[in-house]
Image (cartoon, coloured by chain):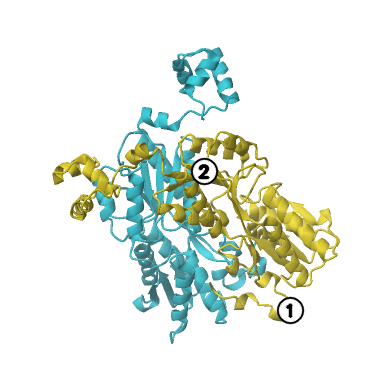
Chain colours: A yellow, B cyan
Amino acid sequence: MAMRMKDIAEELGLSVVTISKVLHNHPDISAKTRERVLKHVEARDYQPSMLGRSLVTGNSFLIGLVVPDLLHPFFAEVAKALSLAVRGSGYSLIISSSEEDPGLELQEMRQLLSRRIDAIVVASTATSGEAFQRMHRNNERVLLIDRKFPIEGGAFVGVDDVAAGRLATEHLIQVGCRNIAHIGGRENSTGLDRLEGYRQALLAANLPFSPKNVIHRTRVDTNSFGEGAAAARLLLSRKVQPDGIFCYNDPLAIGAMHVLLEAGVRIPEDIALVGCGNLHYDNSLLVPLSSIDQKSSEIGRVAGDIVLKMIANKEKNNGETVVLSPSLVVRASSRRGSAKATAKTAKAK
Amino acid sequence: MAMRMKDIAEELGLSVVTISKVLHNHPDISAKTRERVLKHVEARDYQPSMLGRSLVTGNSFLIGLVVPDLLHPFFAEVAKALSLAVRGSGYSLIISSSEEDPGLELQEMRQLLSRRIDAIVVASTATSGEAFQRMHRNNERVLLIDRKFPIEGGAFVGVDDVAAGRLATEHLIQVGCRNIAHIGGRENSTGLDRLEGYRQALLAANLPFSPKNVIHRTRVDTNSFGEGAAAARLLLSRKVQPDGIFCYNDPLAIGAMHVLLEAGVRIPEDIALVGCGNLHYDNSLLVPLSSIDQKSSEIGRVAGDIVLKMIANKEKNNGETVVLSPSLVVRASSRRGSAKATAKTAKAK
């Protein structure tokens, strides 16, 4: 049986109110009593019940996080940073994966909401913001991350995805690519905005934008290796092959990389490759991968700050929107010319 | 405001008891009424409160999972499989990372237990089982995964780590290595058992076991790239360099791989490399990495089954122990001779 506050009080010959005041940092307690209580609490391994704390404050001290796939390191990095950001305030994360299925996402969100969690953070896999609009109307505390919807007053943290697409494509143009393909994502904000950045960079450089050069994939988070490989095969089957490829995310780029190398294509000499996400393993890949850094840890950290602020101010949704600037990390997969590094000279992190 | 069962009842002109019976699949309800209620519940987007369900059943429908690091893909894979295994029964996972710090692990476990979760699953970063022994005495429902302690009656799921070390080392011997080093883990069951397997394989092949060939690292989950690199530098500085290295885990092997390649060492010709974990990205690395498959998904799935069984049977701890057999996956990093594959011919997954 777990020890109760009453047991601690009896053992010390103090009232339950006094013990409670010490544990809640109430100023109305002498330093001597405080020390005596805390020492005993420590010695007896007593843990105050969160359930009791919940009943007093009306908070569950739980934050829900729904991501498309925990195995995708981008979302694991976001989850780690978010967990760290809220842990100090006594909050824990309930993490749930939608497996890139909008129906399952909805079900998981309903399940989390039914637990009366204090806030829900979602990297949505839906292409419509309908469910979030409804949650917003129902005064649920929701924070969208990474992928956004046009919801009036809704809070959001992510990167500027148009800038991400532009940065990657401008870099490919700068290293000499003239026929740049795009292995694209789904029709959500990240997919459409990175495509738009790619288009803008081509037009700004007076290069043609051809829809034929854009290969859209749909299972980009859960089946990314397979989807990237299939898209690369399609591009290689063309009469005129591309000399550069910007991929919606790094796992797609890894799938494409395998197919290109198998076909004897030299990376980056024949085809330069840039991904998006700047994952943990990018530097250690077959060909170390150039990538757009999406600031995964900062997204998690900022998301934590925003939800804690919402909860502290008893706001349902403060409409705070933070758009971070992406940056380009150049590695061997797009490093052409004299500065070109081979796999052998890539540095360990 | 969330809709209540009372609202649904009033709108349909039925009693709250009838609505409740439908939602709990009570047999005492006509098919017609059942259909009418369920249709209305669907249309009104009504979600029964888990809090209510918790008060009725005494369960929180929460399972805690504590791992050393969510960014390490092995633990992300376990988490994904565990989540999937318990989701169908209405359970959610509270996931917490110990950052490979035994003190933080203890604090996070206490925090989870204070939430009155139904079970806690831990890949412990501790080197002593003291805290678990105490939880066991306190009748907490604890399942250890991956790393075990000698706790009487304690439940456990993991792989046979002696077999893992033996498999990896036997393979290195079989491809011709005669001076095999081990970049080892911490002094926990996984670290010590893999070392023991390595030792057994050497002795069985009449090769000397030299403690000098074992480099112990301590931050093997959170700083594995750096630790693997440092260990490889140490091995390269030796008068007699090894011709094969078995690494405690894959991220350590990746760190070592960078240092070897930078030093001009050919993998596997000069030094063959085998890791442990068989991670998602092993096939796409600078040199695709041979590895021991630790059955991460199966560990998660079996762990889910065991805790659900414990909860259903109202057992505190059923002492169930499942030890899975590891297997070897050979890739370019140890494929010597005619069957040797170069990076270019590695197949995409």
Closer-to-camera residue (A39/B150): A39
Relative placement, left or right, of B233 versus A20 is right
Same chain for marks 1 and 2?
yes
Percent x, y of residue B37: 54, 18
Percent x, y of residue A337: 73, 79
Percent x, y of residue A286: 63, 68
Label 1: chain letter: A
Three-letter amino acid code at disc 1? Answer: Gly
Residue under pointer 2: A120
Label 2: chain letter: A
Give neighbour class at mark 1: few <14, some 14-19, many 20+ (Cα, 10 Å): few
Closer-to-camera residue (A340/A106): A106
Percent x, y of residue B62: 41, 40
In the image, which disc is placed on residue A165?
Answer: none
Give how far apart the Cα atoms at labels 1 and 2 are. 48 Å
Q: Is residue A201 above or below residue B244?
A: above
